[in-house]
Image (cartoon, rainbow, N blue to C red):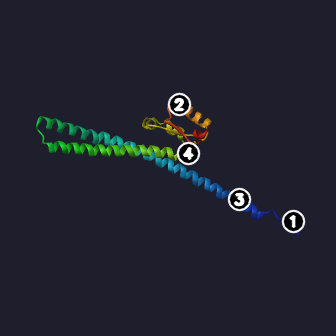
Amino acid sequence: PRPLFNRNQGGVARAEAELRQATNLVLVTEAGVRLEVQQAINAVAINRERVEYIQREHLTNARESRDIVEASYRLGAADLIDFLDAQRAFRDTLRTYNRALYEQRVSLFELGDGILGTYGVEAILKCADIRGALTSLVLSANDPVAAWGGVKLLREKFSIEPSVVTGPSTDNQ
């Protein structure tokens, strides 16, 4: 016997539950991407401020102190130990500055790595601070048309010249 009033209510309920589950998964993924991008943007800002602070407050003072002690040493007013100590202090400060600069550049790289597709690349490249901090830009493209379009977009819209083009597009004959 065939059921006359079976409207496949169980199948419909299962399909609706699967749809809700898929929708929630998309929302969770989007929230995760937004969080990762925001954390990367925050890291760039914090590291930029740290570099500026070290340069402004510590590096300048250490350089001036070293130069003063060096001049005093050349005039005979300071010992070699004083000069070497000032030189060591300057180099320690310079090492701290270079480490902060490295961390700033790593955070910029991680920001670029954490942004996929159209999740805000344009807004980031419009930021003058970020463009100014770029030392090179690697464009990855899936095909020659994407490579051509990416280079054209970077040049015309952002005045950025990519250093390297990579990806499957470079494997074509």
> Which of the marked residues, 1 or 4, is nearer the chain's N terminus?
1
Residue topped by disc 3: 16
Give the distance between the C-alpha atoms of the residues marked 1 and 4, in whole angstroms.
52 Å
Give the distance between the C-alpha atoms of the residues marked 3 and 4, in whole angstroms.
30 Å
Q: Position of residue 91 (x, y in %)?
A: 26, 43
Q: Are marks 1 and 3 in contact (CB under 8 Å)?
A: no
Callout 4 amino acid: Leu
Q: Are marks 1 and 4 in contact (CB under 8 Å)?
A: no
In which quadrant will I find the C terminus? top right
Q: Residues within 10 Å of mark 2 (few under 14, many from 20)?
A: few
Q: Which label is found at residue 4?
A: 1
Q: Nearer the viewer, mark 1 or mark 2?
A: 2
Give the distance between the C-alpha atoms of the residues marked 1 and 3, in whole angstroms.
23 Å
Q: Nearer the viewer, mark 1 or mark 4?
A: 4
Q: Position of residue 38 (x, y in %)?
A: 49, 47
Residue topped by disc 4: 116
